Image: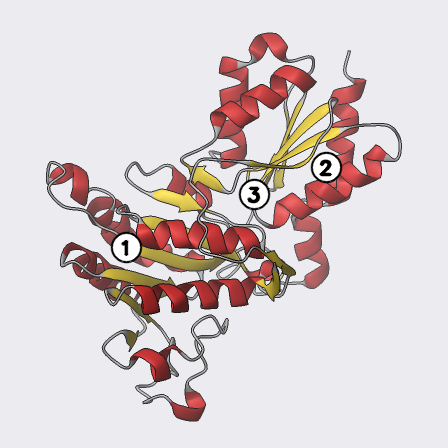
Amino acid sequence: MTKMMYRDAVRSTIFEEMQRNENVVVLGEDVVGGMGTAGGPEAIGGIWSTSTGFYDAFGPDRVIDTPISESAIVGAAGGLALAGKRPVAELMFADFIGVSLDQIWNQIAKFRYMFGGKTTCPAVIRMAYGAGFNAAAQHSQSVHHILTSMPGLKVVMPTTPADVRGLLREALRGDDPVMFLEHKMLYGVEGEVPDGDYTIPFGHAKLTRAGEDVTLVATGLMVSRCEAAADALAEEGIGCDVLDLRTTSPLDEEAILDSVEVTGRLVVVDEAPQRCSLATDIAALASEKAFASLRAPIQMVTAPHSPIPFALELEQAYLPSADKVQAAVRKVLDWR
């Protein structure tokens, strides 16, 4: 086992896959140094330091600084994938998918289907998402529910450095377009990463806490909020299953339903606003397929239906917290 930060797991996994397969290319804004710099001291590896050293190792044909145009970045990634390359396109902020929705939704997601399975589109679109970084309303959103709703895309949301490693390898070696979402507040988190060449198949949630009273379902940063709540409740004799989905498309329905059948109570924690969100989708799933097992109404702990505030105190109030999760657990336990 090796200990590394989340951002280093991203960087090292892409680096090793570029060494392994010459068709893997990286493109995005400032992935080298920006402004057309030719590497050297300004080769910062992007604002999140996830491509540091790539330019010196692989050169300008495989590490490409792009203009500030998300539609061009994603469009180029789609074309590269159709031409036999394995592009890793970086969007600095997930919020900017709006600029490239036609390329993602109408092109990349549909190529394989529209061409009758005669071609593949192994493009990996990486993006930093989420609040807590005090980056205001246009640079802090969680967009996973939008991408999850689009048939043809795989949507991945790793929580730990180990999961980054296994899931990103899986993405880079697969033949489908993958939206790889990295929470900004997790880049500096350290964790143990298994040695060796391992992958994690999509569609397999991870049980990070076990209990028989309530099921907690979350992704990304919200997993640690659920774990903190579960640990505090465990001291009172309340046991919670905590499920880290890891991927939202495909979704591990079986893991969710199996847990709910045991606990009879479900709390879904989602950083996005509740309307038309992942939380509502999972609540609907459990209501449809595990209704007979439910002992209390499903609770959703989400952000409010509002733009994300800039003020630090308001941003923290906006986000789901461990205290809010605990309150939701108590509510389903107290329901009669």
Query: Which-is-in-front pick, marks 2 and 3?
Result: 3
46 on left or right of 308: left
Residue found at the far bottom of this picture: 41
Check disc 2 and report its element: helix, strand or loop: helix
The residue to which callout 3 is attached is 219
The residue sitting at 13% across, 59% down in the picture is 83
Of the residues under marks 1 and 3, which one precedes in the sequence? 1
**Three-letter code, disc 1:** Ala
**Three-letter code, disc 3:** Thr
The residue to which callout 2 is attached is 325
96 on left or right of 268: left
Q: Are marks 2 and 3 in contact (CB under 8 Å)?
A: no
Q: Indicate the colouring scheme.
A: secondary structure
Q: Residues within 10 Å of mark 2 (few under 14, many from 20)?
A: many
Of the residues under marks 1 and 2, which one precedes in the sequence? 1
The residue to which callout 1 is attached is 123
The x and y percentages for residue 213 are 75, 22
Residue placed most toward the observer, 48 or 316: 48
54 on left or right of 121: right
Residue placed most toward the observer, 218 or 195: 195
Residues at marks 2 and 3, CA–CA distance in whole angstroms: 14 Å
Residue placed most toward the observer, 234 or 65: 234
Q: Residues within 10 Å of mark 1 (few under 14, many from 20)?
A: many
Check disc 1 and report its element: helix, strand or loop: loop
The quadrant in which the N terminus is found is bottom right
The quadrant in which the C terminus is found is top right
The x and y percentages for residue 223 are 64, 44
The x and y percentages for residue 227 are 72, 42
Query: Which-is-in-front pick, marks 1 and 2?
Result: 1
**Three-letter code, disc 2:** Val
The residue sitting at 40% across, 42% down in the picture is 146
Residues at marks 1 and 2, CA–CA distance in whole angstroms: 36 Å
